[in-house]
């Protein structure tokens, strides 16, 4: 039996944060009913067409779900949603601030009607405060949370290359819902959860906040290097390639000097004999390291670092990740059905010893409308006015 088998999730979701949370619930066996706009559906379906005509974000975050198309501006559709919620365990939404309340499905009203229902709202900035109604896209939250100020080169602040604010919010919604499900088994009561993208990402900014709040300076942007540890980051090797490495303690530093750089005196040089001194003199040290590295091929350097148990990595491109030998060795890839045929998909990162996670198809808009309405007791003649796409 899958861990969440028997749990029904109804989701008014779009974009990334809520779909990412509910897909993970579906991975564990929950039935996820995705409520979409008739015709166009979740607007993330149209972000791009790179996955055989489907959008990459949508493919990633929406497998194993059922799609029902409802025009929630119509009273009849609101009645359908309420019937779904009456049978659900979880209701999650990430529409614009106040939109769910205006539809008549506020958390307060739902808690009164369905006391066992777990209700989770995801928003950019939370349900109150001066930023409540401010538009919240991933880049903008990265800016507000200070992430962009510590990411990039010294001259160029940069956003993360993935939707990290959405992902952070989705992860906290997912874990919060799991916590509420466990609590309900003990208390018999549902819960109201709130996750804001700003607060989720602010939690992940813990180190720079402590560094800035209690130190004298903000962390510097250091590209792929580290603001407070050295050597740590990219170094030029032969063949005009980069090798990434990180020294974490003085034992590693000594071994690095003796057996990789073959310069044992460097380990006791007063400029470099502890991490603080290495950070203060990193430009000089970088020149010394690269003068050695540029005489060697990248694989030769990595083999030396591996032998000395010093952390290292190659700079992979995304296609290198897809073909990564470790993912292949651990059998992480599966195939998922979709409207455009079979697609590769990674299994979730939490591996259970006796549970095979759900990897069911990606739905078309409204694909399950007819079946869900029949479950709710609607007759064929009634269903026709709801079946926008089947």
Image (cartoon, helix red, strand yellow):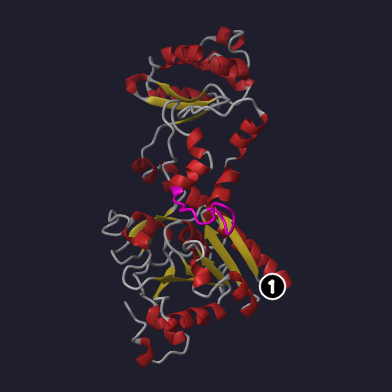
Q: Main secondary structure of the magenta part?
A: loop
From the viewer's perspective, is 235 left or right of 273? Answer: left
Tell me the residue at 53%/21% (across/down). 231
Quarter of the image with the N terminus is bottom right
Foreground residue among 130 and 265: 130
Q: Position of residue 367 (x, y in %)?
A: 35, 75
Residue pointed to by mark 1: 189
The boundaries of the magenta stretch are 125-138
Tell me the residue at 47%/16% (across/down). 286
Label 1 secondary element: loop
Quarter of the image with the C terminus is bottom left
137 part of magenta stretch = yes
180 part of magenta stretch = no
Q: Is residue 290 above or below residue 185?
A: above
Tell me the residue at 50%/17% (across/down). 260
- Is any atom of residue 347 visible in this view? yes
Kindly indicate the quadrant of the structure image that contains residue 5.
bottom right
Q: Position of residue 208 (x, y in %)?
A: 59, 34
Foreground residue among 244 and 39: 39
Q: Residues within 10 Å of mark 1 (few under 14, many from 20)?
A: some
Tell me the residue at 65%/65% (across/down). 180
Q: Is residue 213 above or below residue 174?
A: above
From the viewer's perspective, is 111 left or right of 314? Answer: right
Q: Position of residue 247 (x, y in %)?
A: 56, 24
Residue placed furthest toward the front: 130
Kindly indicate the quadrant of the structure image that contains residue 85.
bottom right
């Amino acid at each position: 039996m899958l861990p969440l088998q028997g749990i029904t999730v109804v989701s008014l979701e779009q974009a990334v944060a809520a779909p990412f949370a509910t897909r993970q619930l579906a991975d564990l066996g929950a039935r996820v009913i995705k409520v979409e706009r008739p015709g166009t559906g979740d607007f993330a379906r149209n972000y791009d067409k790179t996955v055989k005509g489907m959008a990459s974000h949508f493919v990633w975050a929406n497998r194993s779900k059922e799609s029902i198309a409802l025009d929630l501006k119509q009273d009849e559709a609101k009645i359908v949603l309420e019937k779904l919620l009456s049978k659900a365990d979880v209701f999650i939404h990430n529409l614009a601030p106040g939109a769910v309340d205006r539809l008549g499905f506020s958390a307060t009203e739902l808690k009164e009607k369905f006391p066992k229902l777990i209700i989770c709202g995801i928003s950019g900035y939370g349900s109150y405060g001066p930023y409540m109604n401010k538009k919240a896209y991933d880049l903008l939250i990265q800016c507000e949370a200070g992430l962009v100020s510590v990411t990039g080169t010294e001259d160029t602040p940069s956003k993360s290359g993935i939707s990290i604010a959405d992902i952070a919010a989705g992860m906290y919604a997912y874990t919060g819902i799991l916590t509420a499900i466990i609590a309900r088994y003990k208390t018999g009561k549902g819960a109201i959860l709130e996750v804001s993208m700003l607060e989720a990402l602010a939690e992940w900014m813990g180190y720079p906040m402590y560094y800035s709040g209690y130190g004298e300076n903000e962390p510097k942007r250091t590209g792929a290097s580290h603001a407070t540890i050295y050597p740590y980051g990219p170094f030029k090797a032969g063949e005009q390639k980069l090798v990434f490495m990180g020294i974490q303690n003085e034992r590693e530093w000594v071994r690095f000097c003796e057996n990789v750089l073959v310069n044992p005196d460097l380990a006791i040089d007063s400029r470099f004999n502890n991490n603080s001194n290495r950070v203060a003199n990193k430009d000089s040290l970088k020149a010394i390291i690269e003068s050695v590295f540029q005489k060697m091929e990248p694989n030769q350097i990595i083999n030396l670092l591996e032998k000395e148990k010093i952390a290292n990595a190659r700079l992979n491109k995304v296609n290198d990740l897809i073909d990564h030998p470790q993912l292949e060795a651990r059998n992480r890839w599966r195939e998922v059905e979709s409207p455009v045929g079979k697609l590769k998909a990674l299994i979730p990162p939490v591996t259970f010893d006796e549970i095979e996670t759900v990897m069911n198809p990606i739905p078309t808009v409204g694909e399950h409308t007819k079946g869900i309405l029949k479950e709710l007791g609607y007759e064929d003649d009634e269903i026709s006015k709801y079946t926008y796409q089947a």
